[in-house]
Structures are given as structure tokens and as C-alpha cells.
Amino acid sequence: MLKIIYYGDWHGQVAQRLFDHLKSKNIDVELSCESNFKSGDKTFETRKVIYIEDDSAGGYYVLDFKDMLGYKNNFVVREVVHDDRCFKILKSQYRKDHYIDPPYNKIIPFTYFEKNPELVQSLRLKDGPSKSIKKMFFRGQPWKNRNKVLDRIDDIIIPNRLTSIEDYYNDMRSHWIGLALPGWGNICHRELEYFAFDIAVIMPKLKNTFHNDLIPDYHYISVDVNTTKDKSKVIASGIRDAYESVVDDRDKLNEVISNARRWYEENVMFPNSIKLITTLLGII
């Protein structure tokens, strides 16, 4: 029997969809919302993590949605990976050079999701506002370094303000171009939401990889900067150059949007993302 353990937030939507999919395949499975997961004499937290326990195999699998890559700030990398009962870990924020040697090679790249997958995926099936705004869309936490960049491009981007989630998505859908700036992780929910609503994404070239990689200047318009090392002036200049190169090129925007839409539908949308889980883990 399989048991899926999760704890709150949007991860519960993924867990529920996985449960429903396995049940549809006549697999004996349980779903449980718990604040901790026990493996032998070890106890692990469940925040931003889904565990799939396989009683017959005597072990478990992990879906790790935590932003942090390294040992210090991610208990999955620090503790769970060393548990002999842990078979495999699918990690959303993944870089190959971090996970080469055993036991870290049981960590493999996965995909990522929207902040509210069910809401976004239902909204994209409904008519939204027409795309009429050339300025870039961006809404996000006003961290110090991020604000320094935004201040330098305030003439080509809408004001960053707090809104309701409904207004946030409606405003987003009226734009042709969306800006992505890394937060805690190298990839954010925002990028997937742009893909869902057919918005061309401008963002610094990704360091992370997925099971099916995002290709720069194919799935998104890349900016060749290092957001952790480059000064805000350099980052802002790179973003401005990328924006000016595509803002009036409707063919290029539509091409990038089409490529991103196809990637999103194959790797993020339900049920394809759930089928990806079962394929990568080999549990069906």
C-alpha cells in the first residue's frame, strides 16, 4: 500500500491530485495531512515536502518543493537524503553540480507549480482581459536588491503594489510581457503563472534545471546577468535591452509564448505533472 503524507498550502493540491490519480489506477493508497513524517526512529518535517511511503517496498519517495538547494537550509538535503529508507527525491529547485556524489545522486530534477495550481489552471480556461499593455508586469516582495533594479526600469514596468489574488491575475493577463526576478529560489511560482496565461517572460538566465529543461530564448527571453553578484545597474540594463528587443516584435513574443505554453501544459498542468511524478518514481 502507498501512503501520501503532506502538510497544507498548495502542496496539498498536488498531493490530492496524486492520490486521485493513483486511485483511478486501482492502487491501494491513503492520503494524510500531518505535521511530521516518521521513518523508523527518525522524524522529519513535512512543510513544502510530500512523502510517498511504500509499505511493500519498505521505504519512501519524496517530492521536495523547498527553495533552498544546500545542506544548511534544507532539511531534505541535510537529513532525509541520508536515510536508507529514502529511495528517491524529486526536487523542484535543482542544480546538478550540487547532487553528484552518493547519497545525493538520489536527488533528481522535477518540475514546479503555480502558487495556487487549481485556481490558475481553472482561470486559464476562462476568457480574461485582452492583452493591451506593453509595459512589463511584475508584482513581488520589495526586497532591497530587487527594488534597486525595479527603480531603474520604472518607465517600462507597472508599479509594484499589493492586490487581491483575483486582481493580481486579472492585471497579469492584460500584459504581453512579464518580468521575473529570483526570490528565495532561482525559479518562482510567478514564471509558471506567466506561462499559464500566455505572457512572454523576461528573466535572468536560469541556473536551475528541470526534468524537461526550460531553454533560454526559446521558452523565455533570457538576460545574461548574475542576480547575486552583478550590481543593480548591470541587471537593470540587461533587462531593458531584452525588453526593447522584443516589445514591438509580435512574432517573437508569440513564438516564445507558444513554446512556453507547450512546456507548461506538458510539465505543470494537471494531470500531466502528476503522470510525470509516477513515471519518474516508477510507482505505476
Image (spheres, grey):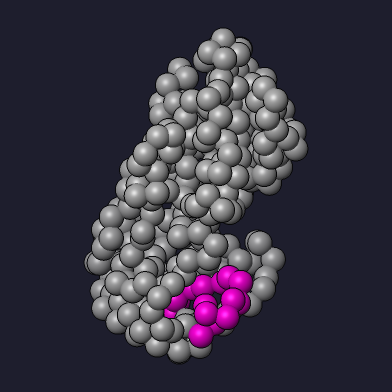
Viewed as shown, does residue 192 lie left or right of 22? left
Task: From this view, report whether residue 231 is shown above or below residue 76.
Answer: below
Task: Please tell me in which quadrant of the rendered image residue 257 appears.
Answer: bottom left
Image quadrant where one finds the N terminus: top right
Q: Is residue 141 visible?
A: yes
- Towards the viewer: 187 or 128: 187
Which residue is found at the position 52% from the left and 49% from the top? 71
- Nearest to the observer: residue 160 or residue 53: 53
Above or below, 126 against 151 in this view is above
The answer to whether residue 137 is magenta is: yes
Q: Is residue 193 above or below residue 137?
A: above
Residue 260 position, x and y percent, is 35, 54
User: Predominant secondary structure in magenta?
Assistant: loop
Q: Where does residue 46 sit, x and y in percent of width and height?
A: 67, 39
Q: Is residue 260 left or right of residue 37?
A: left
Horizontally, is 231 left or right of 80 in the view?
A: left
Magenta residues (range): 133-148
Q: Nearer the viewer, residue 80 or 52?
A: 80
Q: Quadrant of the C terminus?
A: top left
Q: Position of residue 97 (x, y in %)?
A: 34, 49
Q: Is residue 215 magenta?
A: no
194, 101: nearer the viewer: 101
Residue at the image point whose x is 40% and y is 87% from the top: 233
Residue 148, given in percent of the width and then of the height, sits at 51, 85
